[in-house]
Amino acid sequence: MSEVEKTIEVDVPVSTAYNQWTQFETFPEFMEGIKSVKQLDNTKLHWTAEIAGKVKEWDATITNQEPDQRVAWRNIDGADNAGDVRFEPAGEGRTRVKLHMVYDPEGIVENVGDALGVVSRRIEGDLERFKKFIESRGSETGAFRAEIEQPAPQGATNPEK
């Protein structure tokens, strides 16, 4: 398993950053390689992405969601991945966004890319693009403010430190 943790500060209030992050279907607008994210219900998402030149699809579930604080997920099929995004005040009208992810690269191309830091750089770029996306808008495209807490399945990867 590999692990990445990245942090960025955005010039919007915590609620604005959090609300935008819960608009999963907008992820392709700022996440490299993500072709689509479809929210199937309050906790289930279907992802389509291009990874190492191949189109991959998988489902993920939101395992924990605390308004203005945290969104955590784990996949329910495909290569193992799980993580969480935390939102913290960083001064007047600013938010610190912390993304932590654990994942299991598949095949030689993904393993070589991981060893070369491709995933780490991609996530860093995604956060930079999120910053530009939300700051240029000044407001979120929507919000989903439900609290979700699901028990992790036995043997599941725990993204929390």
Image: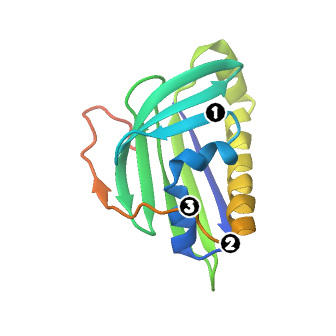
Give the amino acid at mark 1. Answer: Lys
Q: Secondary structure at mark 3?
A: helix
- Count of marks placed on residues: 3
Q: Are marks 1 and 2 in contact (CB under 8 Å)?
A: no
Q: Are marks 2 and 3 in contact (CB under 8 Å)?
A: no
Question: Could you tell me residue 79's position as x and y percent?
Answer: 48, 24
Answer with mark 3 or mark 1, whichever residue precedes in sequence. Answer: 3
Give the amino acid at mark 2. Answer: Gly
**Is residue 58 shown left or right of residue 157?**
right
Q: Secondary structure at mark 1?
A: strand
**Is residue 18 shown left or right of residue 74?**
right
Answer with mark 2 or mark 3, whichever residue precedes in sequence. Answer: 3
| Label annotation for residue 93 | none
**Is residue 20 shown left or right of residue 130?**
left
Q: Quadrant of residue 157?
A: top left
Between 126 and 144, the one lying in front of the other is 144
| Label annotation for residue 138 | 2
Between 29 and 98, the one lying in front of the other is 29
Q: Is residue 19 above or below residue 54?
A: below
Give the amino acid at mark 3. Answer: Gln
In the rendered image, is residue 113 in sight?
yes
Q: Is residue 103 above or below residue 97?
A: above
Q: Residue at x 68, y 33 (%)?
A: 33
Q: Is residue 36 above or below residue 19?
A: above
Q: Secondary structure at mark 2?
A: loop
- Would you name the residue on which mark 1 appears? 35
Question: Could you tell me residue 115's position as x and y percent?
Answer: 70, 28
| Label annotation for residue 20 | 3
Q: Residue at x 59, y 77 (%)?
A: 13
Question: Could you tell me residue 35's position as x and y percent?
Answer: 63, 33
